[in-house]
Image (spheres, helix red, strand yellow):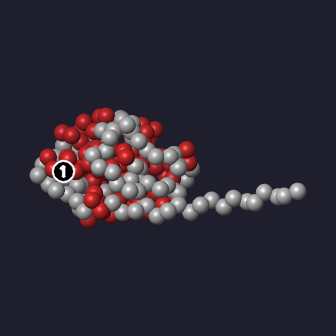
């Protein structure tokens, strides 16, 4: 009788950098992306997804946190993101996030929905004459995609992503809206 050989889970390949997108980020946003990449690796994901980006934004950008309806809502979103990172996200692990939107470009190491969000953030920055993306630009793009994982996280935390996207669309970046 042969005993089965135990399977050792494969170590995920490092999430590669996306130089086309990342060259157009502020230092703060580059830090957000680096945090999302570390989170993706730690979670065993091959790609940065929109929930990784949201988690990193929430942890690092005070203007992003100010866009929510006060501290209790921020705490719920962060709490849900932590739950995701310690087990909830297992149902997403190994799958590619694709909200159905076609990204304007593809980037290795990024889910199609994350690329679409970054392109939306770049478009938002460009509309006000900026070439670099800020945190609220990315939050607005994430909240505007009802099929992405970040919006699923927001919904579970009790945040109306459509309302958040609408407020961010009306508010100038860096002059954050808060209804709390």
Q: Can residue 75 be seen by looking at this rendering?
A: no
- Give percent across and percent down for residue 64: 30, 51
Q: Is residue 47 left or right of residue 123?
A: right
Q: Residue at 43%, 61% (x, y): give it.
A: 15
Q: Residue at 53%, 57% (x, y): give it.
A: 44
Q: Is residue 115 left or right of residue 9?
A: left
Q: Residue furthest front?
A: 1
Q: How many marks?
A: 1
Instruction: Relative to 32, say whether 119 is above or below.
Output: above
- Give percent across and percent down for residue 14: 46, 64
- Packing grade of label 1 (10 A; few <14, some 14-19, many >=20) is some
Q: Residue at 53%, 60% (x, y): give it.
A: 12
Instruction: Relative to 148, say whether 19 is above or below.
Output: below
Front residue of 168 and 141: 141
Q: Residue 72 appears in which quarter of the rendering?
A: top left
Q: Is residue 70 left or right of residue 10?
A: left
- Give percent across and percent down for residue 56: 38, 56
Q: Residue furthest right?
A: 1
Task: Specify the quadrant that holds the C terminus.
Answer: top left
- Give percent across and percent down for residue 1: 88, 56
Q: Residue 2 appears in which quarter of the rendering?
A: bottom right
Q: Residue at 63%, 59% (x, y): give it.
A: 9
Name the residue carrying label 1: 125
Q: Can residue 64 be seen by looking at this rendering?
A: yes
Asked which secondary structure carries label 1, the reply is helix
Front residue of 125 and 101: 101
């Amino acid at each position: 009788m042969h005993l089965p050989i135990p399977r050792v889970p494969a170590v995920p390949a490092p999430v590669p950098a996306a130089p086309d997108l990342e060259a157009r980020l502020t230092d703060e946003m580059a830090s957000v992306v680096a945090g999302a990449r570390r989170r993706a690796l730690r979670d065993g994901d091959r790609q940065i997804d929109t929930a990784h980006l949201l988690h990193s934004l929430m942890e690092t950008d005070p203007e992003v946190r100010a866009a929510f309806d006060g501290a209790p809502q921020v705490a719920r979103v962060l709490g849900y993101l932590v739950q995701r990172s310690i087990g909830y996200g297992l149902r997403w692990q190994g799958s590619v996030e694709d909200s159905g939107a076609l990204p304007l470009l593809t980037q290795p190491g990024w889910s199609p929905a994350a690329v679409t969000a970054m392109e939306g953030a770049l478009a938002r920055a460009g509309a006000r004459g900026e070439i670099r993306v800020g945190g609220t630009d990315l939050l607005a793009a994430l909240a505007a995609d009802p099929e992405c994982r970040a919006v699923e996280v927001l919904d579970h935390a009790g945040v109306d992503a459509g309302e958040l996207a609408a407020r961010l669309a009306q508010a100038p970046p860096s002059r954050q809206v808060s209804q709390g």
